[in-house]
Image (cartoon, rainbow, N blue to C red):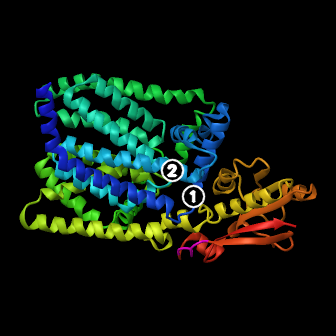
Amino acid sequence: MNLTMKKLEGLFKKWRMTIILLAVVILISLGLRLLKVFVGTQPIFADEAIYVRWAQVMKAEPTLRFLPLSDGKQPLYMWILMFLLKPSFDPLITGRMLSVSMGILSNFGVFVLSYILFKSKKISLIASLLYAVSPFMIFFESMALVDATLTAMGIWFFIFLLLAIRYFRFDLSMVSGFFLGGALLTKSPAVYFSALAPLTVFISIFKKNIRETTIKVLNYCILILPAILIAYGMYNILRLGPNFHLISQRNSDYIFPISQIWTNPKDPFIFHIKEIIDWLWKLGPGVIIFTILLGIIAGLKNYRRQTIILLAWIALPLFANSMYAKVYTARYILFVMPYIYIISSLFILFKTKIQKLSYLMLALFIVSSIMVNYLLIYEIEKAPLPKSERTGYLEEWTAGYGIKEVSECLKIYQKNNPDDKLVIGTEGYFGTLPDGLQIYLNNNPEITVIGVGLSIKELPNQLKESREAGNKTYLVINSSRLDGDPDSMGLKLIDSFPKPIRTIGTHDFYNYGPRETMYFFEVI
């Protein structure tokens, strides 16, 4: 007993300062993400509205627990979220807080993975710090999207996979399988983790003696078999849903066929690579590009095998996405970012003058991250977002400026006029509207929100009938979707919510003018 206590005391003394510093890093990470959620002014995004609405419906109706399959999406994020939603709390903030918790889990995972690979507390702490303050991670890990969950599942699968390989433990392999299964139940790119598992095994145990390597590979294939069986056993739970087949169907909408690599290898590959560099430069932030290069050089010199494994986890998904993705945005590479920050942390391995330069680059990274994070939290319209992110999250119909304000206005009116029935028509049938309004009015059954279509030139029949029935009737619509004259349609403007100026050169800038505005009309 005394011997055990002495060992624990010795271990605590050895790790005390590291634990304190890691706790500081995690607190910084949590604080920045909480500021983004509770203080930031970023409006609800289309996919956020959809996912939170799905979770509300799934919570209310047990027979619809596989609802996301109707759009070819995996439901794990919504399964978790539906248990967290409370009538008295903002549903969007609840969804964003789930992503924040996944981001903190990933941040801790970066420390653990770095230490497993390099046995260096210093490298692990720097990798964790890079991850904690990076605007890229803060931006996406504070949104109600599935990508933060995929990232967390991926990094912890990687951790337990490496531990299983190192100690040849089937129990650790089984734990890794549960994380891989969680990833597969979250989003389709988890298939990359499955592909990287045998490659990680091969690189980890490779020796120049081919016969010895072959025997070990066969043994380790048996080791990871439980992980694969557990993961795909979990994934096949989705077959209980009526629309399981839509996952592969929807995936085909987002990717080119395999033949793309030999029929047209440059397009969109080169364009996507340029986009990745732009994303890293603006949200990485830019210093990360130089620390990546220094980290690769230092890593190949000092930790060749570990660095090659990390490069595989970065390069394979990025290459495949760049070659085959029809639609590509910055959040689609979120799940490889932990490995980018880990490999970047290896710059501290340089000695003498280059090491001093490396620490200067670390200081520049932190300072530039603070500057970008300040804008993301307090003045997001001025933040240096990549064009695709700025247009999607801030400028166009996908950005839900004014939605919460409209919902509050409707709640107040209904509270003051409890006998009135309210009907609100919105553009579209799916997305920012009507889902964005529905998540806030979910607990107000006397308020009905319905989608009435796009490119509205005249008052939709549903709203005409509602008005004739004596209901208080409204229309919420973006200016780009309103093709008719409001006065001739019998619409009275209650409020309008202008969005940030459109990026010059975009399609919508030339077609709809310099600014999108969301209108809140009453049908009179």
SS assignment for the magenta stretch, majority = loop
> Residue 484 location in percent, x, y?
80, 70
Q: Earlier in the sequence, mark 1 or mark 2?
A: 1
Measured in 3D between alpha carbons, the distance from the residue under mark 1 to the one under mark 2, in whole angstroms, is: 9 Å
> Residue 9 location in percent, x, y?
15, 37
Label 2 sits on residue: 145
Left or right of 47 on screen, residue 345 = left
Q: Are marks 1 and 2 in contact (CB under 8 Å)?
A: yes
Q: How many marks?
A: 2
Q: Is residue 276 magenta?
A: no
Look at the image and tell me whether residue 386 can be seen. Answer: no
- Return the residue nearer the eye: 520 or 503: 520
Residue beneath the point at 73% across and 57% down? 411
In what quadrant of the picture does the N terminus appear? top left
Residue beneath the point at 22% across and 27% down? 217
Q: Secondary structure at mark 1?
A: loop
> Residue 385 location in percent, x, y?
44, 68
Q: Secondary structure at mark 2?
A: loop
Q: Is residue 195 above or below residue 424?
A: above
Q: Is residue 500 magenta?
A: yes
Q: Is residue 206 above or below residue 485?
A: above
Label 1 sits on residue: 45
Look at the image and tell me whether residue 444 can be seen. Answer: yes
Q: Which mark is residue 328?
A: none
What type is the residue that disc 2 sits on?
A: Leu
- Return the residue nearer the eye: 379 or 459: 379
Left or right of 480 on screen, residue 178 = left
Q: Is residue 486 above or below residue 459?
A: below
Which range is magenta? 499-503
Residue beneath the point at 23% across and 30% down? 165
